[in-house]
Amino acid sequence: MAAYSTTPSPAVRSNEEWVADLQAPDAQSQQAVADLYALIRRFLAAQLLKRGPVDEAQLDDLTQTAVVRVLAKLPTFRGASSFTTWAYSVAVRSAFSEIRRTEWRNVALTDFSLPANPLAAAVDGGADAETLAQRRAVLRVLHRVISTELSDRQRQGILAELEGMPLAALEEKMQTSRNALYKLLHDARLKLRRGLESAGVNMEEVTAAFGL
Amino acid sequence: MGWNDKQAAALAKLTAVTRPDEIACDDWLELVAEYVDLLKSGREIPARLQPVQDHVEVCPECAEELAALLSPFESEA
């Protein structure tokens, strides 16, 4: 595992002091931004080490982008949490999303297609005949709904999700926002659920059949 | 080729855990810091923050971010 250079702990501030200092003019603001940078860099370094190797330059880039995001969102900080927890939440979304996009940069949505036969997989896992039959019935319905009831974009999104593509990468490739993408996929999942219910399959049966 | 076992189970899970009243990722991000502070301090999670937990059941990315926010971190003040 890589080691990161350490920086001194920034000054401890209350929520109000953070907001005031970050919005203050000149030197006071510069010190607060430097302290915020140091805090976020230490937090991201700790989190990224768990995820995999990342070099100092990449850590600096991710931190810089995260600090810009935090400052841009500062007017939305309501004080419902500590400022640092809030800043970390914005920073981890920023940094992880950037890494996820990079990891999937060379994968195209056209690489994914609906399989002709949903049952080609064994889907057994040592299950008994009744459970296997139930799994197959569920997959047949889901395959039909994906094929005939989802929009092209919904189908594209669901198939990409099944391949493990993160939403951060998917939103970039589909040229949409995170919230709009989530709504698109949520609507698609609701169609899948209604399709199963219309076929007489309830969610408890799905959960039991797949051991979820 | 069809779906492999993992994909078949993932599709089944995505469908089974879907709720009509889910919050989206950006809405989740607006609430998660408060949720994390309450959880870390052992205080009760109010019902209005329950969607934060529900969301991570269907969103592995937000689940990963929540895990990061909940992990011990030496610089916390």
Image: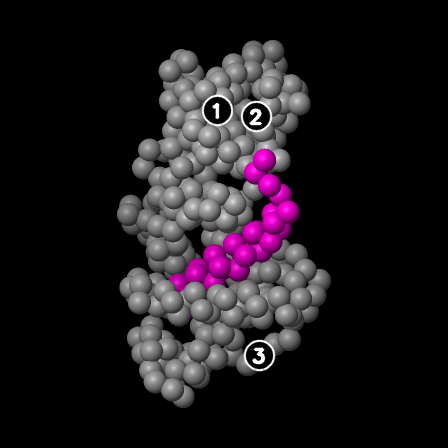
Q: Is residue B63 visible?
A: no
State yes or no: discs 1 and 2 in contact (Cβ < 8 Å).
yes
Q: Which residue is mark 3?
A: A7
In this figure, which residue is indicated by the disc labeled 2? Answer: A114
- Residue A27's spot in the image, x, y percent? 40, 88
Outermost residue toward the bottom in this view = A27
Q: Which mark is residue A146?
A: 1
Q: Are marks 3 and 1 on the same chain?
A: yes
Secondary structure predominantly adopted by residues drawn in magenta: helix
Q: Earlier in the sequence, mark 3 or mark 1?
A: 3
Kind of element beneath mark 2: loop
Within 10 Å of disc 1 (Cα), the crowding (few <14, some 14-19, many 20+) is many
CA distance for labels 2 and 3: 50 Å
- The subunit carrying tag 1 is A
Q: Does B53 appear in magenta?
A: no
A18 left or right of A172?
Answer: left
Mark 1 residue type: Ile
Q: Which residues are magenta?
A: A84-110
User: Marks 1 and 2, how far apart in space?
Assistant: 8 Å
Labels 2 and 3 within one chain: yes
Q: Position of residue A90 (x, y in %)?
A: 43, 61
Picture quadrant where residue A114 is located: top right
SS class of the residue under badge 1? helix
Residue at the (43%, 46%) spot, across then down:
A176
Badge 3 marks a residue whose secondary structure is loop
How far across and how far down the image is residue A39, in percent?
A: 50, 73
Q: Chain of mark 2?
A: A
Q: Residue at x 39, y 82 (%)?
A: A29
The amino acid pointed to by label 2 is Leu
